[in-house]
């Protein structure tokens, strides 16, 4: 197989070809992702008999998580919309923050809800509220949506108990409490700059189509159906929305709450699984936002079925991005990037960010980037006696968020839900992620200076 600089060149050409073919020539993204992935594997010299299997494994590994999350989250969002729950939360946020500050409200809500859950889970939970807030206030969708994804992204990459952050804490032998404290110091201003501030700048410059299929699927059928005085209570709606958050918190603290290996520990882990937690929340919504709101079983079945149609394109694109991810790993592109990063003499802080950033660009996965980079840099940092390993966790997490593009499932999730073109997704989501990465690195470096690291 091809190795070294030539392999990296092939990978760069493949990614550029993807962008040009989809953005410039308007080719079907799913077909283009598949063709370019297979073409890269052939150019890299992978045995022909292994190429399709590697692509399929990448697709399956990604969809095994994302497809279930999107389906269950969409059903929960549909129940929130049909019952008027999303409208109740939207009205409450508008009343608390005022119409001119709803973008700040969405950032703070996402930052809080996103602490214990994966980015994709938080996104599908909150996107119906984003649609409703934007519609009720008349502000551009991106002015509300981008702060939401900024808050989710920051906590996903920087703040324990996210799995990658926790793994990095372990690798660097950092203190969890100090890591969380420093992550909040760095994360809140980072989310503010990359979210509400950036959204205020970019939203007027990106014109979205008047019709958004996902917004219509989640809101239009039930919009105006429930009179104002019959909207569900704020408490019951928020409780339903936060059930998966609470369950996942329990799962994350399973080893603290119950002895590992015991039946209680296994049950906590089971209930805290993101799929199980969302399934239980969706079932609860059928009662609290369905039967208790006067809907019968036939109506609830109709809601849960009709909202899934627009998710087909999303799952296919996310899966194809995972297939490209699989090819990049199998051809050795990720390994070549790792080897390349080790040739440069950098401080542990900058090395953690650089290795994670290169892995993120190559594989599209923030979790893979952060965990891989921590494993590479930790022995070097420990040998050098770096005094603040908590800052290494933050720097590595910042690097793992940079430059989300076509091999990242999150890229396609944002594109399809917000109904943007590929070019618009680069201008908004990709720039936002890069801002998060660079601002978090700068603030971490400043914190290191203050602490004398």
Image: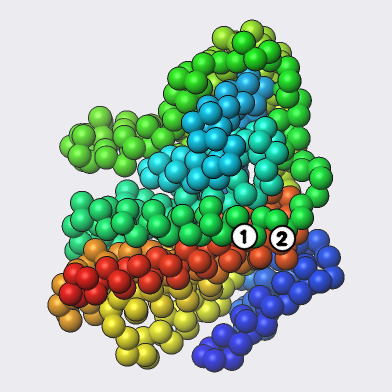
Relative to residue 308, is residue 268 drawn left or right?
Answer: left
Pick the front one: 379 or 151: 151
- Residue 198 visible to the viewer: yes
Q: Quadrant of the N terminus?
A: bottom right
How packed mark 2 is, by other alpha carbons closer than 10 Å (few <14, some 14-19, many 20 or more), is: few
State the separation of the CA atoms marked 2 and 1. Answer: 8 Å
How packed mark 1 is, by other alpha carbons closer than 10 Å (few <14, some 14-19, many 20 or more), is: few
Instruction: For the residues labelled 2 and 1, say whether their Cβ atoms are less than 8 Å apart.
Output: yes
What element does badge 2 sit on?
Answer: helix
Image coordinates of residue 163 in percent, x first then y, are 36, 52
Image coordinates of residue 31 in percent, x first then y, are 77, 62
Q: Which residue is mark 2?
A: 205
Q: Residue at x 60, y 15 (%)?
A: 231
Q: Residue at x 59, y 65 (%)?
A: 430
Q: Which residue is mark 1?
A: 201
Image coordinates of residue 103 in percent, x first then y, are 55, 45
Q: Residue at x 41, y 35 (%)?
A: 245
Relative to residue 97, is residue 157 drawn left or right?
Answer: left
As drawn, 46 above or below 26: below
Q: Quadrant of the C terminus?
A: bottom left
């Amino acid at each position: 197989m091809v190795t070294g600089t030539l392999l990296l060149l092939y990978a760069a050409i493949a990614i550029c070809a993807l962008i040009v073919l989809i953005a410039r020539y308007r080719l079907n993204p799913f077909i283009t992702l598949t063709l370019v992935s297979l073409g890269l594997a052939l150019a890299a010299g992978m045995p022909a008999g292994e190429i399709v299997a590697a692509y399929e494994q990448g697709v399956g590994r990604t969809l095994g998580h994302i497809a279930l999350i999107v389906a269950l989250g969409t059903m929960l969002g549909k129940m929130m919309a049909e019952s008027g729950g999303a409208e109740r939360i939207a009205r409450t946020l508008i009343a608390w923050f005022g119409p001119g500050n709803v973008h700040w409200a969405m950032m703070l809500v996402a930052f809080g809800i996103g602490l214990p859950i994966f980015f994709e889970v938080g996104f599908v939970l909150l996107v119906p509220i984003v649609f409703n807030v934007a519609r009720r206030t008349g502000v551009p969708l991106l002015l509300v949506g981008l702060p939401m994804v900024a808050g989710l992204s920051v906590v996903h990459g920087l703040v324990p108990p996210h799995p990658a952050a926790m793994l990095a804490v372990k690798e660097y032998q950092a203190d969890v409490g100090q890591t969380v404290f420093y992550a909040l110091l760095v994360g809140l201003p980072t989310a503010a700059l990359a979210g509400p501030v950036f959204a205020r700048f970019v939203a007027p410059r990106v014109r979205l189509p008047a019709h958004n299929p996902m917004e219509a699927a989640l809101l239009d059928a039930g919009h105006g159906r429930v009179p104002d005085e019959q909207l569900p209570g704020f408490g019951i709606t928020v409780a339903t929305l936060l059930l998966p958050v609470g369950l996942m918190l329990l799962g994350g603290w399973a080893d603290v709450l119950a002895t590992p290996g015991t039946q209680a520990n296994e049950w906590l882990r089971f209930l805290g699984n993101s799929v199980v937690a969302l399934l239980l929340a969706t079932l609860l919504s059928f009662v609290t936002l369905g039967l208790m709101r006067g809907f019968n079983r036939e109506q609830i079945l109709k809601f849960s079925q009709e909202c899934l149609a627009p998710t087909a394109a999303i799952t296919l694109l996310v899966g194809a991005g995972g297939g490209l991810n699989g090819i990049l790993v199998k051809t050795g592109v990720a390994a070549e990037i790792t080897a390349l990063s080790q040739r440069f003499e950098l401080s542990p802080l900058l090395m953690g960010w650089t290795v994670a950033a290169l892995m993120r660009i190559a594989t599209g996965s923030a979790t893979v980037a952060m965990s891989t980079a921590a494993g590479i840099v930790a022995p070097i940092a420990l040998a050098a006696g770096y005094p603040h390993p908590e800052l290494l966790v933050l720097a590595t997490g910042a690097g793992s968020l940079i430059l989300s593009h076509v091999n990242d499932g999150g890229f396609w999730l944002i594109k399809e839900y917000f109904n943007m073109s590929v070019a618009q997704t680069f201008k908004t989501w990709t720039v936002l992620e890069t801002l998060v990465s660079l601002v978090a690195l700068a603030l971490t470096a400043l914190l290191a200076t203050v602490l004398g690291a």
